[in-house]
Amino acid sequence: MEVGTHVWLRSDEQSAWGWVPAIIIRRGSCAGSTSGDRPTVRLVLRNEPVRFLGDGADDGPPKNTSSPLPDMSAVMPHETTIFADPDLLRASGHDDIKIRNTGGEYFPPGTLNAVTGIAEGPADLADAPGGTDDLMELAHLHEPAVLFGLMARYAGNAIYTNTGPMLIAINPFKELGLYGPELSDMYRKEGEGARGTDAPRLPPHAYRTADNAYRAMMRGIEARIAGGGDGDGDGTSDQSILVSGESGAGKTVTAKIILKYFAGLSSRRAAHVSVPSGKMDGASVERQLLLSNPILESFGNARTVRNDNSSRFGKYVDVSFSSSGTIRGASVEVYLLEKVRLVSPGATERNYHIFYQLLAAATPGERKDLHLSDRVPADFRLLATGTYGRRDGALDEEGHKEMLSAMTASGFSRDDSTSLNRLVCAVLFLGEINFEAASRGGSCRLNDEPASRAAAKLLGVKFKDLERFLTSRTVAAGTEYFTKELTVNEARKVMEALIKATYGAAFDYVVRTINDSVNAPPNAKTAAHIGVLDIFGFESLGRNNFEQLCINYANEALQQQFNAHVFRAEQEEYKREGIRWQDVEFPDNQDVLDLIDKKHTGILALLDEQCVFPHSSDEKLCRVFYTRCSDHTRFSATATQRVNLKFNIEHYAGRVEYDAISWLEKNKDELPPACLELLDTSSFALIPKIRGFVRASGRPQKGGGRRATAKSVGAQFSFQLRSLLRRIDMTAPHYVRCLKPNDLLLPDRFEPRRIVEQLRHGGVLEAVRVSRAGYAARYSEKQFAFRYYILGPQQCSLGELVEKISFDIWETDLAKERALEKAREAKATAAARKSWVTVSNAVTSTTRPRHRRKSSFGALCDALGINGKINDGAVATLETTDEEAGGGNLVPLLADTALSPPPYKGVERIKNGIAVPGTPAEFRALNVSSQCALAGIQVGKTKIFLKREALDLLEGMRVDAFYGAASRIQGLFRMDRDRTVYKRKKMKVVRLQDFFRKILSKNTHHPWSQWMGILTKITVLR
């Protein structure tokens, strides 16, 4: 980093971004340092304005949103001094200083079309590093570069940005008009090649990601058919789009956009292909899928701290296509519904939307039938959190009407809709029932209250049966069975289990009904599939429980799959560019996956093991964790955490503390056998339909046997996740990372710290590191020539420039290697000389003067046949006094002394699979490809790739060249300036002499002539 370099400086205190733009104004050795070559870098920091940064100075929207770009002219100069290792500065590896991409860091205002997001400024604006739509094209790619690149596009309402293999989508929290039919048609035409080669390339968009997946699928189908196949799906053409992000980042909306785009492509194909009767066309399937969203959102979404419409489950939509590209059907698979929210929602959150929607939209007749009377959410224990409305302005009454309309169109009968509403009310009233302790022992009884009566009636069971099955259970002892009365706390646990079991079964029933309406007909012939995964993102909350472990486990597995795919994509780019490459290591988090889900020893396996024991507890479970997992590098627990039943897991996104309380109960998540018997006695028509979805524990069977116990929640989730990963591995994945710019859900508010946090949790920064592991930097031919032109001869071609740079890098590397070998030889010889100093003392008189002893040592070296030519500095360190020599009585055995090998002189070395030449002639005898490989440079078809070592050397050579050029320019300038001054003075002197000579020539007796004669004699004498 030379003077004048534009950098990013880490500044957590002064900047809301964590980084501030700066410029190096001075560089020199630190006078107060022990190392004279340690430079002092003085930086002028420029503070960014507050109005766009969202730095927490105010909780409202930006005061001025007319131009959301940072006003770089309004700066407050501030100087700071940083002491840094020169090697780190040269390698751009300093943690607090990063080189800034200059030449278009931000989009100028008005250069982006608000509708299409296409640059309308200069033609080369897209090549400007800050304005590029693919951050991988930046010359310097690191955290501040990614952050400010996203900010530059967000400021221009360009919410989509490519980062290598993934699409980053920032939720704008406002309508931008980016999803109209005209724009969708533009991306379709670009995918089909109908826009022409001269048309500008469209910017990143969810439409492009969807189109890329669709075109790849069609190419696979056509290639398989051309190869003699019949078009049946075999996985080779299958695609998948993985959408992830935090709650409120826009995952569900993005998935809807993608599915709608698929339906549009399918409908156009169907217009030219006859669809057999009895099969749904693409529009109807897409309509069914879109109509399923209001239903699933009502039953599976809730208001959380971060989002008013947060999906509390994962969803994978598999769309099947025919060989002609038309949609044949679809299926929906859900993962890990958060059922614990039913009985313990957060203090500032809401329960599932369906409860509030029903209470807001129920008619007087429905209120009478459902025993609601004039009740409101605050009157129910499961809803009384103090938070009842929504910040996004959505009305619960309108949401309920939309849900009922979608149910009608999705194949739900009127009785199904009414029955689901009835079951929802039954869940609410189950939460209202109370127990009181009985007079005998530790038993209890169910209070005979209106809420209890309403719950029994809505469930279609008798009140006495409800009381009996909630307050007692059957215990097997050999072949005999006994009835055990339950305490108040135990009865409440049974009641909560009944709530979660019935609601969870109803949700699964809703999903199955939706699938029945969108599944392809049995005789439909599908050629390929495209899956759209709307999955929850990595979570690290204030209190992380069993649900967060499962969510983060899923993200760990998906991150590993993502790393493998990025690795393969990197290799594909090397092949596409036609360069030679070696295997690139990528991060492997298999150890974390083993910690969580390894057979017999993983956390989930240990949890299942403890669930089998009848008297296990949370304390015993944690003791098992501490004993069996304490040696794992990713697992830790302090003494305080052990007391509070907590532990840490080091995930790829950071350390997360987990609270193990209630894990056993949540992992079992089973309805006691008595409650199953209660449901079997129900007269409610919906209960038999959802009965098959109820998870039940083992219960007595005829003949004394017991029914097999259902899989635990952890085991079931692990099975689903493995199945999902196998399905994804059989597809070509495409990635979409959704980001939320702020937690206040406000438009035009960009909070950099939140963005960086999500980038880390989403693995984006890690993906950047993986993608650049092979070649740290890559430049287009134009960028490379512009940056390093000074290193080549004048008016040279790109090939000549690369050849010259390759030779200079090889020569520098060779000089360093030889210098290193020479230093090793000097060190070894000095060590040998020091070890033989006692020999010198033995043959040299101790009374001889000090200056004579050195020559005696040289004579001794000559006698022994040892090279005694050592520099004076080394000799000075080897001179000893008589006392240090110990009288010269010890003489080491020469046979035990090993000398160092000779210095490096043409010793053959292998680098990048090529023998390193020892002379310039040998280097120039190699072909250009080998020369570049030795220098760590690869020239592709459109880009030039640089290894990290080559980049460091190249940057250093560039700095030296600029310094040398500046010195030469200064020398020429000073020479011209001094020459001009000299000529000017000489001219004046000549004129003055001419004037006096004229006078003297006219009057030889003038006094001046006498003086001139004397001066002439003196000059001659000198």
Image (spheres, rainbow, N blue to C red):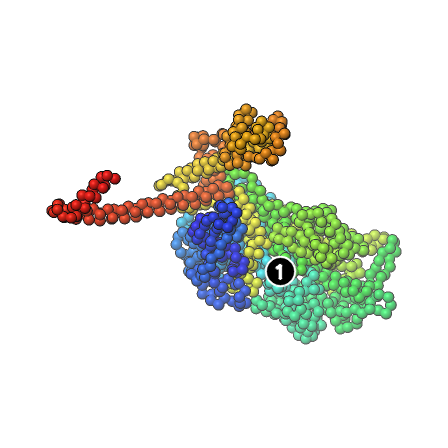
Rendered residue at 64%/53% (across/down): 655
- The quadrant of the image that shows the C terminus is top left
The quadrant holding residue 253 is bottom right
- Looking at the image, residue 115 lies above or below residue 26: below
Where does the image place residue 66, in percent across and percent down from the top left? 45, 65
Question: 497 or 539: nearer the eye?
Answer: 539
Q: In the orientation shown, which residue stands out farthest toward the left?
A: 1002
Q: 836 above or below 494?
A: above
Q: Count the marks.
A: 1
Q: Is 342 on the left or on the right of 14, as rendered?
A: right
Percent position of residue 204, x then y: 49, 53
Query: Could you tell me residue 349's position as x and y percent?
Result: 64, 66
Q: Is residue 429 above or below residue 115?
A: below
Note whether 1003 is above or below 404 in the view shown. Answer: above
- The three-letter code of the residue at mark 1 reads Ser
Residue beneath the point at 56% across and 41% down: 584
Quarter occupied by residue 304: bottom right
Quick check: can you spot residue 595?
yes
Assess disc 1: are there few (<14), some (14-19) or many (≥20) residues with their C-alpha within 10 Å of its C-alpha.
Answer: many
Q: Which residue is mark 1?
A: 311
Element at label 1: strand
Instruction: Tell me the residue at 36%/44% (across/down).
Output: 968
Looking at this view, is 16 or 163 the one in front? Answer: 16
Is residue 324 among what the camera can see? Answer: no
**Can you give x and y, in whole percent of width and height, for residue 498 in the image?**
74, 62
